[in-house]
Image: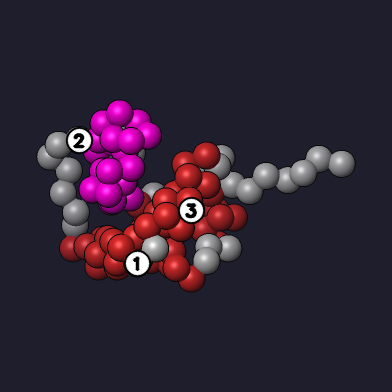
Amino acid sequence: MAIATKNVWDLLEEAPDYVENLSALISWSTNYNYQTGMPYWAFLDLIGYSEEHYGGKRNEDEFTLDYASTELFAAALIEWGNRPQDVEDFIDQIENAEW
């Protein structure tokens, strides 16, 4: 019997409370053109995850947050500030899951 692997949507739906806003930011980010950037990538760039795991920024230099994603972005930063390792473990799961 094969073990079902979770995709990104499963992980977001079942996300722990301590990444509630990050999960919402990731979901919201799917409304953006991934070729030029998205708020979730800006989050990864800011906390240093992109540099550590990808060797550089994921967003283009001129990418800016829009008003709709700023609140989620700020709340996700607070989650990361409160539980950085747990949040980064969740990010690892997201980054390694199938879209």
Question: Label 3, on which residue?
Answer: 90
* Closer mark to the observer between disc 2 and disc 3: 3
Q: Is residue 11 magenta?
A: no
Q: Residues within 10 Å of mark 1 (few under 14, many from 20)?
A: few
Q: Residues within 10 Å of mark 3 (few under 14, many from 20)?
A: many
| N-term mark: 2 or 3 | 2
Secondary structure that dominates the magenta span: helix
* Closer mark to the observer between disc 3 and disc 1: 1
Q: Looking at this rendering, what residue extends furthest in the bottom direction?
A: 17
Q: Is 31 situated above or below 51? A: below
Q: Looking at this rendering, what residue extends furthest in the left direction?
A: 62
Could you tell me the amino acid type at mark 1? Asn
Q: Given contact means CB atoms under 8 Å apart, are the residues at marks 2 and 1 in contact?
A: no
Q: Which residue is rendered at x = 35% and y = 31% of the image? A: 54
Distance between mark 3 and mark 1 Cα atoms:
14 Å
Distance between mark 2 and mark 1 Cα atoms:
28 Å
Q: Quadrant of the N terminus?
A: top right
Secondary structure of residue under mark 2? loop
Kindly identify which numbered label has been placed on residue 82. Answer: 1
Q: Using residue 5 as the reference point, say whether residue 13 is left or right of it.
A: left
Res 56 → quadrant: top left
Distance between mark 2 and mark 3 Cα atoms:
24 Å
Residue 42 can be seen in this image = no
Q: Position of residue 48 (x, y in %)?
A: 27, 43
Q: Position of residue 12 (x, y in %)?
A: 51, 58
Question: Label 2, on which residue?
Answer: 60
Q: Position of residue 61 (x, y in %)?
A: 14, 36
Q: Which residues are magenta?
A: 38-59
